[in-house]
Image (cartoon, helix red, strand yellow):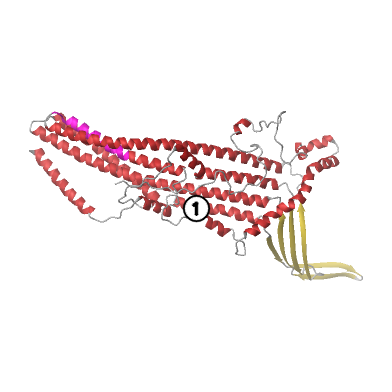
Amino acid sequence: MKHFFLSSAVRVIGIGLVGLAGLSVAVPAMAEDFQQALVSAYHNNPRLMAERARVREVDENYVQAQAAGRFTINANASIGRSKNKTDFLQFGGVNSTNATLGPKTASLSIVQPLYQGGRVKGLKAQAKAGILSARQGLRNAEQNLLLSAATAYLDVLRDEEAAAIRRNNVRVLTRQRFAAQDRFDVGEGTRTDIAQADARLAASEIGLANADASLAVSRAAYVRFVGHAPANLTAPPQYILPPTLSEALSRGRANNPQLIAARYNENAAQSAIAVAKSTGRPTLSLNGTLQSSRESSANVPRAESASITAQLRIPIYSGGLNQSRVRAAKQAKIRSKFETRETEQAVDQTVANLWAQVVASERSLVASKKQVAAAEIAFEGVELEQQVGTRNTLDVLDAEQELLNAKLSVIQAERNFNVATYQMLVTIGGFDAYSLQLPVDNYDPRDNFNAVIVNSFGKYVPDAVETALDNIPEKTTEALEFVGGKVGKDLIDLANALLPDPASAEKVGQDVSDLAKAVVPKPVYDATGKLIEQIPGIPKSALDAITIDDPFDPGTKIAAPDFIDPEPILIITKQKPKTE
């Protein structure tokens, strides 16, 4: 009787709580769908804002490269005061003169570079390739942010459902515990049945506590990436993946932002070789100066001057510094080529792994749903069999546990399938705001780039002018390289004239003899004319997969900064039709 009143009291309290819960549910709440969550993350996440600022920072490299080829104007002015006393001998004694002056000088200088050995063109190409690489870094950051927001969205849905299932499991086991007590009170059960029910109820309460904790963690992650607490989340959409693994691999190689960035870095490294090469070439500039002075001396109260000069600078000997810079730039290009290949292999591996995960999680989801259907039928049957005495309490508890595990496996399989799908889309470059067609004003980094390359007079530099300026070094190269080409040969005669003693010539070091060779050492070939190893520990066979004529000598030609192979493609990710 005591247990009966206790059971009745619990039921009454439960009804009251349900009534209060019903009142709380009656308060209207705004539902948030998957797309709205991603839009909020796109607008509000500070990590994405920081990455956009980094791209704007890199944009300034192109402006600085432009400035290296433009004229500069400097003004100098000075003012002072001096007092001079001079004693000098004359007939009849010593005379003195005192002079107080206020010297003032002002000068204006203009320097216009005419030829810098291709340095400016190389700097601009290098900067442009770096900017394109940074834009892909922004795109990669955008994809990762949206993936993190989508994963947090799925985790909240999973943990909310898991908490609801476990909470219902606690209620079911509570009823089982009271039922076991009632059977014991009428002599149909044993204390063992009650103990078994108590043990399962305690285990279910532990599971509920862990589920509530996981839900709190998922909600905290949601707030971090989306910007606000989740409320009434709806089911996420299903996206269409490439039909085959080979097509997914092709899309990944063509559109993965990290791989595209690596290819742009290759172009930047190739242009860096031309920049390093320019340090050993002649430079030509035009200098103009205007100067005016007042009271610079007692005899010259005023002086003004104007001059214009052409200055030619020919580097003759730098101690091997320029050649070392060129060799270092070439090795950086070779390194970037290998890094691109490594990134490509990593993308291929990631696509293959995610493809297997998608297939496995999809099969697991189908099997889990079948498991739930079978477990529900089994649980209902065991309960009926218990009522007729063919099953005991432990059989019912086991059936309830199997049904619980089946339901939890379904929500976990759904989450795993969606996350694997989203990760696949990220890897093939189809999970940014454009690909998902989010209703946002897409941030275009080209707007800032077009704004910062404006010249000092407030007008955009016309393409025709840029092309004409770029052609100046090419038109003057033939005339100037005649002088530069003679440097290597003339240095031999110069060394013999200045250092006729061979012992003295040896003191200059090996660099003097190197200057008689080409600016960059030629590749080493064997007797058959085949290129042999030049990098210690790396045979040429390791470079056969790289499609360049000579992987150890990339040359000094400037790479087109915006040309990569394969060309990036724009992907629009489509959703699967919703099933009723």
170 horizontally vs 320: left or right:
left
Task: Say if 524 sits above or below 222 in the image.
Answer: above
Assign a secondary structure to mark 1.
helix
Magenta stretch mostly in which secondary structure? helix
Residue annotated with mark 1: 52
304 horizontally vs 362: left or right:
right
Q: Which quadrant of the structure image shows residue 111?
A: bottom right
The amino acid pointed to by label 1 is Arg
* Image point (46%, 55%), residue name: 442
Q: Is residue 398 magenta?
A: yes
Which span is picked out in magenta? 390-412
* Within-10-Å neighbours for mark 1: few <14, some 14–19, many 20+: many
Question: Looking at the figure, which quarter contains the N terminus?
Answer: top left
Q: Nearer the viewer, residue 483 or 349?
A: 349
Task: Say if 492 sits above or below 453 in the image.
Answer: above
395 horizontally vs 509: left or right:
left
Q: Is residue 64 magenta?
A: no
Q: Position of residue 444 (x, y in %)?
A: 50, 55
Residue 96 in sight here: yes
Q: Which quadrant of the structure image shows residue 77?
A: bottom right
* Image point (9%, 41%), residue name: 5
The residue positioned farthest toward the right in the image shown: 91
Q: Position of residue 251 (x, y in %)?
A: 48, 42
* Image point (9%, 38%), residue name: 2
